[in-house]
Image: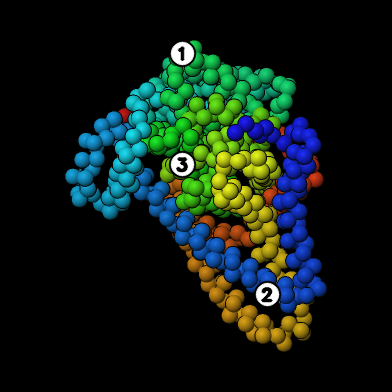
Amino acid sequence: MKFNFSGKKLTGSERAIQRFFEILPGATSWFILIGMTLLSFWNPILAAVLIIAFDFFWILRLFFMTLFLVISYFRLSLEKETDWMARLHGLNHLTDALTFLNKDFGTRSLPQKISSWIHRKEMTELQRSGASVPDFKKIIHLVLIPIVRETPEILRDSISSFLNGYFPSEQILVVIALEERATEDVKAGAQQMAREFEGKFFDFKVILHPNHIPGEARVKGANVTYAAREMTRYFEQKEILFDRVIVSCFDADTVVDAHYFGCLTYQYMVCPKRERASFQPIPVYHNNIWKVPGFVRVLETGSSFFQLVESTDPEKLVTFSSHSMSFRALVEADYWPVDMISDDSAIFWKCYIHYDGDYRVVPLYVTVSMDVADAGNWWKTIVNVYRQKRRWAWGVENFPIVMRAFLQAKKIPFSEKMGHGVKLFEMHVAWATWAFLLSVIGWLPALFAGREFSHSVLYYSTPRITAIIFGFSTCALVVTIIMSLWLLPKREKRDSVFRRLGFALQWVFVPGIFTFLSTLPALEAQTRLMLGAYMEKWGTDTMQRPAVFSSPAPGKQ
């Protein structure tokens, strides 16, 4: 389906539809927050009933999210030691590999048996599909790293992690997509990286993105799109087929797991419609996690948990932050949007619409680690984190474009359009309202009710209801604390019991942290979109950090 995936330069009915859906999320969020506040004053009993009903809904949602978090974490742990390179070799001989797996099944531990069962299922489905299986030795990984102010210290950690993995670096092509408006120091740093890593990859290039190209905003998508177009000509000149190229778009601070490219290549090859899929790893923010204030650590761990939960629902999964996809799909969908901030999720929707719904995201149970937006002191860090969350929440700009596309799309089933549309809308409204309802507005009915409330049945039922909600919340919080301690990287020195207890107790401040550093920026983003005060700049200030070298795979020291 041909569609103008942009909210700019629309006219007539398209512009009216676009504005309606731009206003809808923010208007809904403000209606809920203001409406419940006023209702707490005018009719506190009714407001209390609605708040309790919402609390029950929230606690059920929390229970299921905790359950799926445990399942996803188990799957991530399950694949932690998987030899993806051995599985890649086996794909070139499917029948022999399946026979070997069946014979070897009884000698393995339980986690290995589960992983092998999943592996056999994927290989069997691939065999039944009749899809061709390319030789993994002919796969080229194109890694695009857009930069505007990042230093060589940050780039070196990221690029070194590609080199130190298990996958052959001779099949990895690294491109630094450099903004022309970058300072001379940044430009010199990019060239320094090209010299430092020369000859260690399939190729290493620095591509300068010119300023002031018509139709472009100052966003990352414009930068990586320009670089990808240049690489399109590069592959055509070298007669490299697009369906043999997997493109990954990484932030400059992205440090990949040693298994990343092996896992990605395997999942690409076993996917029957590999050219109609994006591949989403689990993003974590561990590079400098022990050097930032505790409230940031809790917030970013929560972000990682959210992505773990999302990975359990691949039918509704959308790309976020660092992701990978077929280069052919990228070219056919006409690359990333060049006038949107939320390019990482927008490229999924652009492909989904272009292929009339025949596009999906495959979760990768392997991590990519990035920096927390640290600025050296508490106040500046708070400002940086707030801006980062506001930029993430600006993903709401996808909603009006996607809904406008759904109104025109005739080949996408109505049930799929409804499912995606409702989830996208509900996710953003929930993001901007839940924390306020739970931590602030939920207390207002009791404050305004007075004596009338104390004589009601609800007054006597409230303690029991509160106890149930508190009990479920406590159980979910305990599970979250335990898993946060498991997920965080090990410190160089062992902490005392009291210090580790302090890390766990930081989760007690979750309501305040998420209200002011997650929900509030989301509400601001929706309000900006509602009022037409569009965000059009890419970039978050971060403090330069010391090198955080990734551990090389055995044999690559």
Whether residue 132 is visible, yes or no, is: yes
- 204 to 308, vertically: above or below: above
Q: Residues within 10 Å of mark 1 (few under 14, many from 20)?
A: few
> Tag 3: residue type?
Val
Q: Earlier in the sequence, mark 2 or mark 1?
A: 2
Give x and y (percent) for residue 418. Answer: 60, 51
Asked which quadrant contains residue 62, the reply is bottom right
Q: CA distance from mark 2 to mark 1?
A: 67 Å
Tell which residue pokes out farthest to the top in this image.
237
Q: Which residue is mark 1?
A: 238
Which of the colour schemes (rainbow, by chain, secondary structure, one colour) is used? rainbow
At x 81% / y 73%, what residue is drawn? 42
Q: Which residue is mark 3?
A: 362
Q: Residues within 10 Å of mark 2 (few under 14, many from 20)?
A: some
The residue lying toward the viewer, choosing from 372 and 376, is 372
Give x and y (percent) for residue 249. Answer: 54, 31
Q: Are marks 2 and 1 in contact (CB under 8 Å)?
A: no
Whether residue 524 is visible, yes or no, is: no
* Quarter of the image where the C terminus is located: top left
> Tag 1: residue type?
Lys
Q: CA distance from mark 1 to mark 3?
A: 29 Å
Mark drawn on residue 49: 2
- 58 to 292, vertically: above or below: below
Q: Earlier in the sequence, mark 2 or mark 3?
A: 2
Mark drawn on residue 206: none
At x 68% / y 58%, what residue is drawn? 433
Horizontal side of 410 relative to 557 (left or right) equals: right
At x 71% / y 65%, what residue is drawn? 440
Q: Secondary structure at mark 3?
A: strand
Q: Secondary structure at mark 1?
A: loop
